[in-house]
Image: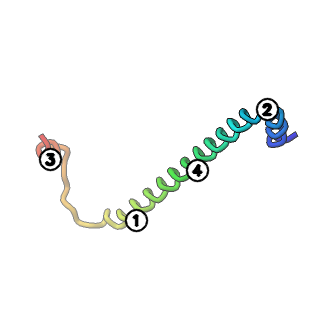
Amino acid sequence: MIVTEQIADRLQKLPPSLQREVLDFIEFLAQKVAQREAASEEAEWMKFSLAQAMEGMENEDSPEYSEADVKERWQ
């Protein structure tokens, strides 16, 4: 018996109030998965965006700053 069949079999044996709780929990889990997927997709877009923005900058002439320069500026 596959998992979905086991769930359906056990669910049918529960009273309607508990069946509703199971449904609420399933919806909660589905929302949790959707949020993870959205966060993962957003992170991928952020990486892509940063990579595109920084592309070629390593070849540009820019001033060299040392750690001492940064500390002096922000003390």
Q: Amino acid at mark 4?
A: Ala
The quarter of the picture where residue 53 lies is: bottom left
Residue 1 on image: x %, y %? 88, 39
Residue 12 on image: x %, y %? 83, 37
Front disc: 2 or 4: 2
Pointer 2 with pointer 4, Cβ within 8 A: no
Distance of label 3 from label 4 (alpha carbons): 45 Å
Distance of label 1 from label 4 (alpha carbons): 27 Å
Q: Secondary structure at mark 1?
A: helix
Q: Amino acid at mark 1?
A: Gln
Residue 24 on image: x %, y %? 65, 40
Which residue is identified by label 4? 34
Which residue is identified by label 1? 52
Q: Tell me which label, 2 or 3, sits earlier in the chain.
A: 2
Closer to us: 57 or 30:
30
Which residue is identified by label 2? 14
Front disc: 3 or 4: 4
Tell me: 58 left or right of 8.
left
Front disc: 1 or 4: 4
Distance of label 2 from label 1 (alpha carbons): 54 Å
Which residue is outermost to the front? 16
Front disc: 1 or 3: 1
Q: Secondary structure at mark 3?
A: helix
Q: Amino acid at mark 3?
A: Asp
Callout 1 environment at 10 Å: few (<14), some (14 to 19), or many (20+)? few
